[in-house]
Image (cartoon, rainbow, N blue to C red):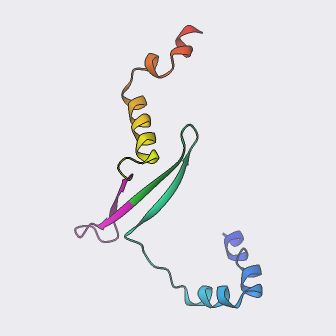
């Protein structure tokens, strides 16, 4: 855990703005936003998300991620989804020939 305590020191000593942020510990939860993910086979996927707090379980939340309709990210997700529903032979035909 000490390594986590040491990493901000150079930033704190070099940046007044970072020093102020770090001292305030002003961490905010984002309930909506955009995430960029990199998948090893299809590359970058950009998704928007909405986070819903679960009132019956304080501290727990659920996030829903969606791709913009008609976007390259939506196409990549459809491609990945098609692989998950295909049989192993359909997904990896070369593996069966070996």
Residue 64 in magenta? yes
- Identify the residue at the far top of this view: 97
Q: Which corner quadrant of the image does residue 21 belong to?
A: bottom right
Residue 57 in magenta? yes
| Residue 25 on image: x %, y % | 54, 85
In the foreground, 73 or 12: 73
Q: Which residues are magenta?
A: 49-67
| Residue 52 on image: x %, y % | 30, 66
Q: Which corner quadrant of the image does residue 7 belong to?
A: bottom right
Residue at x-position 48% and y-position 59%: 35
Residue at x-position 54% and y-position 39%: 42
Residue at x-position 56% and y-position 90%: 24
In the foreground, 3 or 54: 54
Task: Classify residue 22 as left or right of residue 15.
Answer: left
| Residue 82 on image: x %, y % | 39, 31
Q: Is residue 28 above or below residue 32?
A: below
Image quadrant for the N terminus?
bottom right
| Residue 6 on image: x %, y % | 73, 76
Q: Which corner quadrant of the image does residue 17 belong to?
A: bottom right
């Amino acid at each position: 855990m000490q390594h986590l305590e040491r990493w901000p020191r150079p930033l704190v000593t070099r940046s007044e703005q970072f020093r102020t942020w770090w001292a305030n510990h002003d961490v905010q939860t984002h309930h909506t936003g955009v995430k960029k993910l990199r998948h090893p086979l299809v590359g970058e996927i950009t998704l928007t998300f909405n986070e819903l707090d679960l009132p019956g379980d304080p501290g727990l939340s659920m996030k829903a991620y969606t791709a913009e309709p008609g976007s390259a990210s939506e196409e990549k997700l459809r491609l990945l989804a098609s692989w998950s529903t295909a049989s192993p032979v359909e997904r990896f035909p070369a593996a069966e020939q070996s």
